[in-house]
Image (cartoon, rainbow, N blue to C red):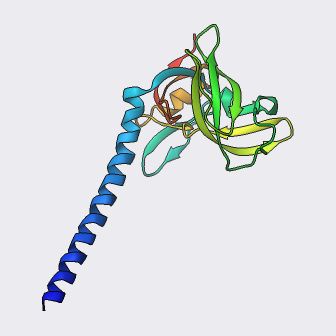
Amino acid sequence: MIQDVRLIKRRTWLLSLLVLLQLLVLAGIAVSYYAVGWFGTEIKLKTAPVDPRDYLYGDYVRLGYDISRLDSSLWNEKEIEVDSGKRVYVLLKPDVHGVYEAKGIYASKPAPQPGEAVLRGTVTNHWSGSISISYGLEKYYVPEGTGRELEEQANNLIAKVKVASWGQAKIVALEPRG
């Protein structure tokens, strides 16, 4: 009988610990998203949007960036092969207008100088002379019915993006170029 009580207490304790760990993981995911906004550095990126629709979330603008397709010469890891699905870090520097451009692609996170930013991405495609990278910034949800308006401004938008020191990013706003 005492053995049964101990076993029940042990199982209850383990179950409670498992539930607590799951809650901590979920809270960590949520906090990491908000931490980008709190601690991230704001940068600007040139966009090229297309307007699809998501039946669950409503209108969104699909965005492409000048930094989404980069020249292979920016790959700084000569002894490491570039493969689809590989996590990479793109070093960004602002141009004279304050819009950030890619200056290098790395397999591990480089140390940025003041004014630079590092954006984490995933290689989606690699062929001779070009590397395509996805940053998780390719969808921007907008109020119902406003996606078409943004689509018409296609090449005249700048995305304001917050980038955290660990490379995670989120779109803060879209604004017209100019």
- Which residue is nearer to you in this view: 34 or 77? 77
Q: Give the residue furthest to the front.
A: 2
Answer with left or right where residue 37 lies relative to residue 7: right
Q: Which residue is rendered at x = 49% and y = 30% of the image?
A: 165
Locate the N terminus and report the quarter of the image it occupies: bottom left
Q: Residue furthest top?
A: 96
Relative to residue 82, is residue 173 depicted above or below?
above
Q: In the image shown, does 8 or 125 lie closer to the viewer?
A: 8
The quadrant in which the C terminus is found is: top right
**Res. 61 visible in picture:** yes
Q: Position of residue 150 (x, y in %)?
A: 53, 27
Place of residue 138 in the rendered image (x, y in percent of width and height, measured from the top left)? 57, 38
- Residue 121 appears in which quarter of the rendering? top right
**Where residue 151 sits: x, y (%)?**
57, 30
Q: Position of residue 135 (x, y in %)?
A: 59, 38
Residue 36 position by quadrant = top left
Q: Residue, x 53% and y 32% (percent of image)? A: 148
* Nearest the eye: 45 or 165: 165
**Total numbered badges shown on the rendered structure:** 0
Whether residue 174 appears in this view of the structure is no
Residue at the bottom extreme of this rendering? 1
Residue drawn at (67%, 33%), measured in percent from left and top? 68
In the picture, measured across the screen, residue 106 lies left or right of residue 16, that is: right
The foreground one among 86 and 70 is 86
Q: Is residue 50 above or below residue 30?
A: above
Left or right: where does residue 146 sit relative to residue 154? Answer: left
- Whether residue 66 sits left or right of residue 25 in the image: it is right
Going 39% across and 29% down the picture, which residue do you hit?
37
